[in-house]
């Protein structure tokens, strides 16, 4: 069996696993968490908004490929990233951290993935033709430029509302969050879609 055939067989198996509700959500949660931890390394103070957030692109790609039933994986992965970030930023243990902020941010991440997938499914006629330039551009503008406005606004407002962000850092963090999620979608959603289509 040649290497290319082995890779195709592996991709098919992973695709079957990802379509399963439980396994797909767990795989997405793990992927979101690991890539989110990488994104945190590039985060602006106070450590939530990152200039590149690969997890947003992976989440959108998975939801486009495998459906909205995997949004729980986005919530779980984002929650895990944000609760560990909050614990690190406050210097307390994971069990002592309040869960409200990480949960609200996680719901925002899932809503962004849902909204991006909805926009793309509504306004991009043939996602299977992802190699066509107009399809790629439309997908990236809707998923990476427009849908990402939601979570940047939602999550930055959550942080401000809970006193984690001061007023002078609000717009800097909002812009960084939006750019980070957008770049994550622009880079990683195409990779996920090309892999899965």
Image (cartoon, rainbow, N blue to C red):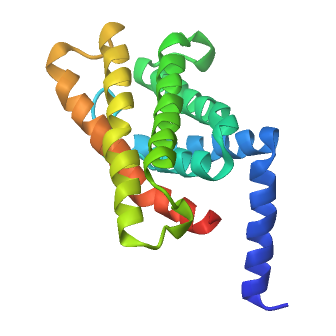
**Which residue is the extreme one toward the left?**
168
Residue 70 sits above or below residue 75 on the image: below
Res. 193 image quadrant: bottom right
Residue at 46%, 48% (x, y): give it.
120
Taking the image as shown, residue 181 lies to the left or right of residue 14, namely: left
Q: In which quarter of the image is the C terminus?
A: bottom right
- Can the viewer see residue 42 in this picture? no
Taking the image as shown, residue 82 lies to the left or right of residue 41, namely: right
Q: Quadrant of the N terminus?
A: bottom right
Residue 21 sits above or below residue 195 on the image: above
**Which residue is the extreme one toward the bottom?**
2
Residue 193 or residue 82, whichever sits in front: 193
The x, y position of residue 4, in whole percent, is: 72, 86
The x, y position of residue 68, in whole percent, is: 64, 37
Residue 65 or residue 106, whichever sits in front: 65
Residue at 63%, 34% (x, y): give it.
71
The x, y position of residue 115, in whole percent, is: 47, 35
């Amino acid at each position: 069996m040649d290497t290319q055939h082995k890779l195709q067989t592996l991709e098919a198996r992973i695709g079957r696993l990802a379509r399963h509700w439980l396994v797909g959500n767990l795989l997405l949660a793990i992927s979101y968490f690991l890539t989110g931890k990488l994104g945190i390394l590039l985060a602006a103070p106070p450590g939530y908004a990152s200039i590149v957030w690969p997890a947003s692109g992976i989440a959108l790609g998975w939801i486009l490929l495998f459906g909205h039933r995997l949004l729980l994986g986005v919530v779980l992965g984002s929650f895990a990233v944000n609760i560990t970030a909050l614990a690190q930023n406050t210097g307390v243990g994971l069990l002592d951290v309040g869960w409200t902020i990480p949960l609200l941010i996680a719901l925002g991440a899932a809503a962004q993935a849902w909204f991006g997938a909805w926009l793309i499914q509504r306004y991009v006629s043939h996602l299977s033709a992802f190699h066509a330039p107009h399809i790629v551009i439309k997908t990236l503008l809707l998923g990476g430029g427009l849908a990402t406005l939601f979570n940047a606004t939602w999550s930055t407002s959550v942080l401000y509302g809970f006193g984690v962000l001061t007023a002078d850092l609000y717009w800097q963090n909002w812009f960084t969050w939006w750019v980070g999620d957008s770049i994550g979608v622009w880079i990683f959603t195409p990779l996920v879609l090309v892999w899965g289509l």
